[in-house]
Amino acid sequence: MELSSLHRARYGYQPKLPEILREPAADVFVETGHGTRAVSDHEELCALFKHSYGKPPVRFVKGRNEKAGGVLNVGVILSGGQAPGGHNVIAGLFDGLKKGNPASKLYGFLGGPSGLIEGKYIDITAALVDQYRNTGGFDMIGSGRTKIETPEQFAASLETAQRLKLNAVVIIGGDDSNTNAALLAEYFIDKGSGVQVIGCPKTIDGDLKHQYIEASFGFDTAVKTYGELIGNIARDANSAKKYWHFIKLMGRAASHIALEAALQTHPNICFISEEIEAKGLSLSQLVEQICGAVIKRAENNENFGVILIPEGLVEFIPEVKTLISELNDIMAHYKSEFEGIRSFQAHCAWLEKKLSRPSLVLFESFPEEIAKQLLLDRDPHGNVQVSRIETEKLLMHLTEKKLISMKVSGAYNGKFAAIGHFFGYEGRSAFPSNFDADYCYSLGFSAFFLIAFGLTGYISSICNLSAPAREWVAGGIPITMLMNMEQRKGKRKPVIKKALVDLNGAPFRAFAALRDELALKTCFKYPGAIQYFGPPEICDTTTITLLLERGG
Ligand code: FBP
């Protein structure tokens, strides 16, 4: 592979670690806190996680550990969507293991959790790790979205772990993957296997968040990548003064990415799904809001603008949410009948008898492309794949329609030309920012210490993230602490509770204080590209969200 100059330079970057993780393994001790409770549904979760529920949080402190230095065999899995920094978690884990004892081994399961189930793995060697240090993507071992859920899959996972004589499995993933890590940890204890399971918080969506998990890795780099692109578009719009840009941003249900991008770039409008649900705003009210800004700006001859749309928006607009939920039920209940229908027209005719009247009217009012996207396959968790629904195009279409009708009635006389964009995959495999490179390396190193101290069912935790890396606090918390019970595919299941945007939180309040002015005036900010080398105030700062949440 021919390397770019930046690629080569990034190999030489030494990620910064918290002070405590730089100590020799024998000089690090574990301090335990008090027993913990789940987010809610304490009794039910306690019964489901008989062996692993309610354990205390731990953090690493200076102290003597006579037992340090044993040989450990560990397997690692990258799970779910790519997030910048995954390779550095593996590098941190690898370096930690080798620092503990050079004879320790790390195996990488290929293609996500299915690699563990099917026993597909590679040896992770120093030469391999060195090819991936500080790089984006998950291509070192690949990723996948297989959920370990059947008794056979659990048994096969244990068989693989025992065949490789593993002390532990590390699962690097989001809320669903770490839920799986908790279930696997409980299963391994129940079988008396002694195989530990440790999770690491990954997802660009930023919705795996808690007092002890201040950020999921990848969010920082992804939003900085989108921030650069949105800033460039905003500047182009302000130069040409002729287009409205409708930009959908990844993030699944949560609007953290859109909110952070809005704080970075000051678009004219940014919808926050959580607020739309809380206020019960309809699709036509959102379109009216857009038209209001278009008309007002046209009065100043500003026939251009930027609108940010969180990926999951459609699922938070009450009437669309009802439609999607009816479709989910119908598609699950009449699966084979639904799959047997060959054409879109035939699907529509079939749905006429199945959907409620208001949902049918709404479905039929959508452009054909959008209606088709609502019928695409659900993900393994039964959710609609919001990344594949072109909400930006839907809003462009409805805005244009409304403005045309206003022109006919003489209520509006400006120009409107819209361009749609979707930013998601562009940010998931970028070279990790210094923050993500440091944070991920620390998470991996911390996972090693959790394993060395014999813990299981824990997620690696690095706190105090708005401070310089040397002051970060390393440790872990039991995964059950993040969980509650939710209805999934018609059954109550233990799951990690998604952290959506808090409408009372500092990031949302900061945006809400600005937005009336942003809607009318042109106040764009241009963050520019991620900087990897240079002064710390340009290269090492993290997101506005994290700084505001940490009171910065
Ligand atoms: P994770 O939750 O697994 O980190 O994935 C996040 C995400 O990037 C979402 O923002 C997006 O909706 C989804 O993955 C897209 O999934 P896919 O890669 O399967 O298209």
Image (cartoon, rainbow, N blue to C red):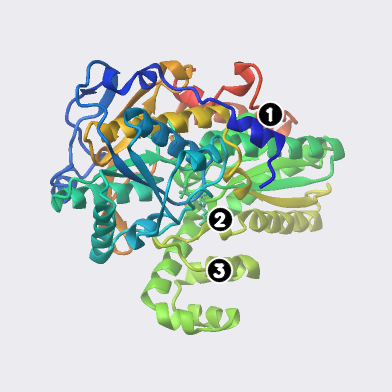
Q: Nearer the viewer, mark 1 or mark 3?
A: 1
Q: Ligand 1 within 8 A of label 2's CB?
A: yes
Q: Earlier in the sequence, mark 3 or mark 2?
A: 3
The residue type indicated by label 2 comes to Ser
The x and y percentages for residue 479 are: 28, 40
Determine the residue located farthest toward the front in the rendered image. 103
Report the disc number at residue 355. Answer: none
The x and y percentages for residue 24 are: 33, 20
| Disc 3 from disc 2: Cα separation | 19 Å
Which residue, given by chain and number where applicable, does mark 1 sit on?
527
The residue type indicated by label 1 comes to Pro
The x and y percentages for residue 352 are: 50, 79
Left or right of 527 on screen, residue 509: left
The residue type indicated by label 3 comes to Phe
Q: Residue at x 22, y 36 (%)?
A: 455
Q: Residue at x 51, y 26 (%)?
A: 15
